[in-house]
Image: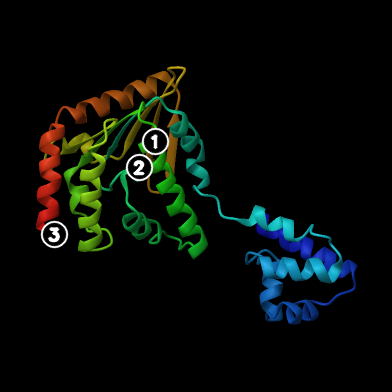
Amino acid sequence: MAWRYCGNQIKLWRTEAGGTREELASEANYDSEYVKSMEQGRRKPTVRLLRVADQLYGAKGKLEAGFDYLKPEPFPARTQQYMHAEAEALAIDWYEPLLIPGLLQNEQYAFALIGDSCPPLDDETVNERVEARLKRQALMIERASVAYGFMIYEAALRTGVGGKDVMKNQLNHLLALNELRNVTIQVVPEGRCNGLALMGSIVLLETPDHDRYAYSEVQTTSLLYADRAKVSELSQRHGMIQKHALTVGDSTECIRKVAEEL
């Protein structure tokens, strides 16, 4: 919608000034069909086109100012409510069956995952989302008084995301993060608790007001629950999985062993 609105504004300013699309395309050094796509919102209007149109049609900065609203969101729309809750949480407990939890991903691993999205994302959106993920991790490191507990099913250590080098670096990154006082990482060995351990991720959050939320994500669906019954159900599932997890020390040795095998 932002692309369509901004593109329509270019068209309105152009037609009111009596300009043609071909003239605008020539001034911006674009093909006229490319400009047409931007005016119709099928492509994102570029800052160059906005700047040229601004000058040609006397918009006095009004068109160029629209570029700030065209920048990609750092998080998919379906996860934004959770991101707000995560940023304010007093404690977070996170279980992942097949991927490294987002807060623990290094840059290479995050690029490999986000860059392989379907439908494909443009480079700007991929970069924005990777940067946002790394900022969340930096905040976790800074918030030393917030407790972060992670459980990872052993299969997630062996998925080969991005290739052997990426996975080896990612596993070593886990070992480094596990040294933080406010972070604990546990591995759930393969073959244990299969009924629950393979059914999807579970994230439990507690706010400074001691409200409790639960978050679950699968494929294109994600939900943040505030309903006490649902939060209790997911908390019990998380607790059952945790009963099968290795200790923090044994988990560290498990991660190190898998990294050495790569």
- Relative horizontal placement of residue 194, taking residue 57 as reference (left or right): left
What type is the residue that disc 2 sits on?
A: Leu
* Vertical comparison of 150 with 170: above or below: above
Mark 1 Cα shell of 10 Å, populated few (<14), some (14-19), many (≥20): few
What type is the residue that disc 3 sits on?
A: Leu
Q: Which quadrant holds the N terminus?
A: bottom right
What type is the residue that disc 1 sits on?
A: Glu
Tell me the CA gap for discs 3 and 2. Answer: 23 Å
Residue at 35% of width from left, 42% of height from top? 103
Tell me the CA gap for discs 1 and 3. Answer: 31 Å
Q: Which residue is mark 1?
A: 142
Residue 211, how many percent across, how many down?
Answer: 44, 19
Residue 108 occupies quadrant: bottom left
Circles 3 and 2, Cβ within 8 Å, touching? The answer is no
Circles 1 and 2, Cβ within 8 Å, touching? The answer is no
Q: Which residue is mark 3?
A: 262
Circles 1 and 3, Cβ within 8 Å, touching? The answer is no
Q: Which residue is mark 2?
A: 103
- Relative horizontal placement of residue 73, taking residue 4 as reference (left or right): left
Nearer the camera: disc 1 or disc 3? 1
Q: Can see residue 220?
A: no
- Relative horizontal placement of residue 101, taking residue 154 as reference (left or right): right
